[in-house]
Amino acid sequence: LETLKTLKNDPHLRSIPVVVFSSSTAPSDRHLAYLYHANAYVIKPPQLDAYLQTVRSLEVFWTRTATVAAT
């Protein structure tokens, strides 16, 4: 979360999309991530196959589906 705060407080870096990829399911952790302007909060699945599928899905979304701000 400290890195997220640093990125989002820097005017030159704040447009970089940040996905918090965490094992925490605590609502307070999700709340803080979004409070600090995370673009997404994803809970890591404990099973390897599900973990890898989640990472692939994130890659597809952020590299092929989403459009990011022009610099």
Image (cartoon, rainbow, N blue to C red):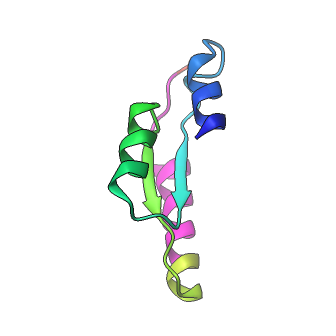
Magenta: main secondary structure equals helix
Total of numbered circles in the picture? 0
Viewer-side residue, 70 vs 29? 29
- Please report the residue visible at 50 percent of the width from the left and 32 percent of the height from the top: 68
Residue 23 placement (x, y as % from top left)? 52, 67
| 1 left or right, relative to 39 | right
Residue 30 placement (x, y as % from top left)? 39, 50
Could you tell me which quadrant the C terminus lies in? top right
Does residue 70 lie above or below 17 as drawn?
A: above
| 35 left or right, relative to 6 | left
Does residue 57 lie above or below 65 as drawn?
A: below
- Please report the residue visible at 52 percent of the width from the left and 48 percent of the height from the top: 19
Q: Is residue 4 visible?
A: yes
- Please report the residue visible at 60 percent of the width from the left and 12 percent of the height from the top: 11
Viewer-side residue, 46 vs 49? 46
Magenta span contains residue 57: yes
Q: Is residue 66 visible?
A: no
Magenta span contains residue 68: yes
Residue 24 placement (x, y as % from top left)? 47, 64
Does residue 51 lie above or below 2 as drawn?
A: below
| Residue found farthest to the top | 11
- Please report the residue visible at 49 percent of the width from the left and 77 percent of the height from the top: 45
Q: Which residues are magenta?
A: 53-69
| 36 left or right, relative to 56 | left
Does residue 3 lie above or below 7 as drawn?
A: below
Residue 1 placement (x, y as % from top left)? 58, 41
- Quadrant of residue 66 in the image? top left
